[in-house]
Image (spheres, rainbow, N blue to C red):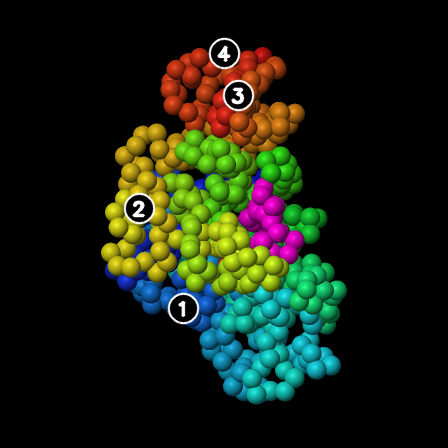
């Protein structure tokens, strides 16, 4: 495999609105991000992904862009952005931005012109389609609920397509002018010194222009618009073209937000000549989807989770690198989803971190994950900001749940769980702002915050630092980055274990985590412990000494170890 500059990097996602507010208006901003670069550097982060900071009406928190060449006022200025790039560069860090080009904002001048003048060339930048038999062109349900077709005001029997909110009209990628505009914009940012992009909702850009209706999959008579995405082919032609004229020549790092990829397309997506450098591994998160919505989702079961991650790891081997996450701005906090009740504590969080950071692939830490931030309780649906949460609350009520039950569903699944302000200190509003935060902080900030954990040697934060440092330690980084992933101890129902190994070295790394309630002893067979590289429990030194030369390993509930082993 040809080595590329991003293979051994650790990435960190910043949700700018909630990261750090430098001017007291309650909204995180570029000044705040710049002030925390040293914190991120110290943590071991190389690549910073910024969720959208472009000009936007914020109907979908910046994923509705009204000007691709401007920074939203609430985040600061282009000068500040340039400072951020320069400051990151001086620390050997890379900045990537969100590329949201499946759709733009309905406030974008292209869309405004298209509405104002049906004869304008911008009309063809979007999908304006005539209805069928007095109905919308098809029966697709948008990601955020309701039809994907919005009637055009003042025009009879005319609709435009939006896969997400109606304020996010889809861009017509079939139009070469649209593609040209998008590529020009990408290159403009890359020329500024941006290292690449996280690419939003990209699989949706290819449409079946017949817009066929499908059998309804819900009481509303609609079918998820993903059905059309699943059925249509040809997205690769667009992606190949985009990469050839933008990312490739600039050696940019790209990570695709790819759902609904056909399995046999892995090579085309992230192989050596792939459309993207990497794509997120959402396989574990797909386990949390309910059949009809959040309300009928089932809790994640350990063995299913383990099997899913194992399959996903093996799928990419020999092909390319997935990007691993336990949470992001669209998902609840990972420790609440993937840890069993009894493990939702410091030690359990360290165990999950151990698994997460030793898998094969590029780790993306989401802000606050490193201090173990958790889901956030709200007392009423009106306290939620997220557009998706309001839709899913209604879906739950329509399905017959009581208000209390529907609220509980939101507590477990809302995108606001990950969007509450970053918890920096034990002081008011978690030290995020001197003003009033745009979204209230999680009240556990008193114990869960950076300042407190930085002072405590055994904290989760310091454990993340150790883990990242271990991943990058020269003697092992080759194995952690390029080593194969070989699952182990599958016959133990509560153990998540695997070897990381390279063909031409005698030592291997063995990661073992006991997600069960009971103590477990595992015989290592023909393997011998050379060294304990890391473990998530206290008395490390004693245990390290004891373990050396052993051919079996005993783990308490929620214990995790990273071992250097060799064959006898
Ligand atoms: O998400 C794309 C996407 O597929 C979402 O439907 C995702 O599954 C959902 O948010 C989970 O609840 C991206 C962004 O990450 C998201 O924040 C945006 O809202 C969306 O695109 C539209 O741009
Ligand atoms: Ca601010």
- Helix, strand or loop under label 2: loop
Residue 55 badge: 1
* N-terminal label among 3 and 4: 3
Which marked residue is nearer to the observer: mark 1 or mark 2? 2
Q: Which residue is drawn at 55% across and 13% down?
A: 551
Q: Distance between the residues labelled 3 and 4?
A: 21 Å
Residue 278 visible in image: no
Image x and y of residue 436, in percent:
29, 59
- Which mark sits nearer the N-terminus, 1 or 2? 1
**Front-lying residue, 420 or 181:** 420
Q: Residue 281 lies in magenta, yes or no?
A: yes
Q: How far apart are marks 1 and 2 (CA)?
A: 27 Å
Tag in front: 4 or 2: 2
- Which residue is labeled 3 in the image? 519
- Position of 227 with respect to 70 (left or right) is right
| Label annotation for residue 424 | 2
Q: Which residue is drawn at 60% across and 69% down?
A: 146
Q: Which of marks 3 and 4 is in front?
A: 3
Which residue in the protein does label 4 denote?
549
Membership of 308 in magenta stretch: no
334 or 100: nearer the viewer: 334
Crowd class of label 4 (few under 14; some 14 to 19; many from 20; radius 10 Å): few
Mark 3 or mark 1, whichever is nearer to me: 3
In this rendering, the answer to whether 543 lies above or below 295 is above
Please determine whether, in this image, residue 216 is positioned above or below residue 360.
Answer: below
| Spatial separation of the CA atoms under disc 3 and disc 1 | 53 Å
Q: Is the magenta stretch mostly helix, strand or loop?
A: loop
**Residue 329 vertical placement versus 111 (above, below):** above
């Amino acid at each position: 495999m040809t080595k590329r500059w991003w293979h051994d990097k650790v990435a960190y996602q910043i949700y700018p609105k909630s990261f750090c507010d430098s001017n007291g208006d309650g909204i995180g901003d570029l000044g705040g991000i710049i002030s925390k670069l040293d914190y991120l550097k110290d943590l071991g982060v190389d690549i910073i992904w910024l969720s959208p900071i472009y000009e936007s009406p914020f109907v979908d928190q910046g994923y509705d862009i009204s000007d691709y060449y401007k920074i939203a006022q609430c985040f600061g200025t282009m000068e500040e952005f340039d400072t951020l790039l320069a400051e990151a560069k001086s620390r050997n860090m890379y900045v990537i931005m969100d590329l949201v080009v499946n759709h733009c904002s309905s406030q974008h001048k292209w869309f405004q012109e298209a509405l104002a003048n049906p004869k304008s060339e911008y009309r063809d930048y979007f999908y304006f389609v005539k209805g069928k038999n007095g109905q919308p062109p098809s029966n697709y349900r948008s990601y955020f609920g309701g039809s994907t077709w919005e009637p055009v005001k003042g025009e009879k029997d005319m609709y435009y397509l939006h896969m997400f909110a109606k304020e996010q009209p889809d861009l017509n990628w079939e139009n070469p002018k649209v593609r040209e505009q998008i590529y020009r914009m990408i290159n403009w940012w890359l020329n500024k010194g941006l290292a690449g992009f996280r690419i939003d909702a990209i699989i949706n850009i290819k449409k079946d222009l017949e817009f066929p209706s499908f059998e309804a999959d819900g009481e509303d008579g609609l079918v998820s618009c993903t059905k059309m995405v699943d059925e249509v082919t040809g997205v690769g032609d667009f992606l190949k073209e985009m990469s050839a004229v933008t990312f490739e020549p600039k050696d940019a790092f790209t990570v695709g937000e790819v759902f609904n990829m056909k399995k046999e397309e892995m090579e085309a997506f992230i192989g050596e000549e792939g459309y993207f450098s990497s794509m997120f591994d959402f396989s574990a998160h797909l386990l949390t989807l309910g059949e009809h919505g959040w309300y009928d989702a089932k809790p994640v079961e350990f063995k299913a989770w383990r099997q899913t991650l194992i399959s996903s790891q093996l799928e990419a081997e020999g092909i390319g690198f997935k990007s691993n996450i336990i949470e992001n701005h669209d998902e609840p906090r990972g420790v609440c989803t993937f840890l069993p009740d009894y493990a939702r504590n410091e030690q359990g969080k360290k165990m999950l971190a151990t698994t997460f950071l030793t898998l094969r692939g590029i780790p993306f830490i989401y802000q606050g994950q490193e201090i173990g931030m958790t889901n956030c309780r709200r007392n009423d649906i009106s306290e939620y900001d997220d557009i998706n949460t309001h839709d899913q609350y209604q879906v739950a009520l329509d399905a017959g749940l009581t208000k209390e039950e529907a609220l509980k569903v939101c507590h477990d699944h809302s995108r606001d769980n990950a969007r509450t302000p970053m918890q920096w200190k034990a002081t008011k509003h978690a030290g995020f702002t001197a003003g009033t935060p745009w979204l209230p902080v999680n009240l556990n900030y008193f114990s869960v915050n950076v300042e407190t954990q930085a002072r405590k040697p055994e904290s989760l934060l310091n454990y993340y630092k150790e883990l990242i440092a271990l991943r990058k330690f020269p003697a092992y980084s080759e194995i952690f980055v390029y080593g194969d992933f070989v699952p182990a101890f599958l016959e133990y129902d509560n153990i998540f274990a695997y070897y990381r190994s390279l063909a031409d070295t005698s030592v291997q790394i063995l990661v073992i985590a006991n997600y069960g309630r009971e103590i477990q002893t595992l015989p290592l067979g023909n393997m011998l412990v050379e060294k304990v590289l890391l473990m998530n429990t206290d008395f490390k030194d004693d245990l390290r000494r004891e373990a050396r030369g052993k051919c079996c390993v005993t783990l308490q509930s929620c214990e995790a170890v990273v071992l250097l082993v060799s064959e006898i």
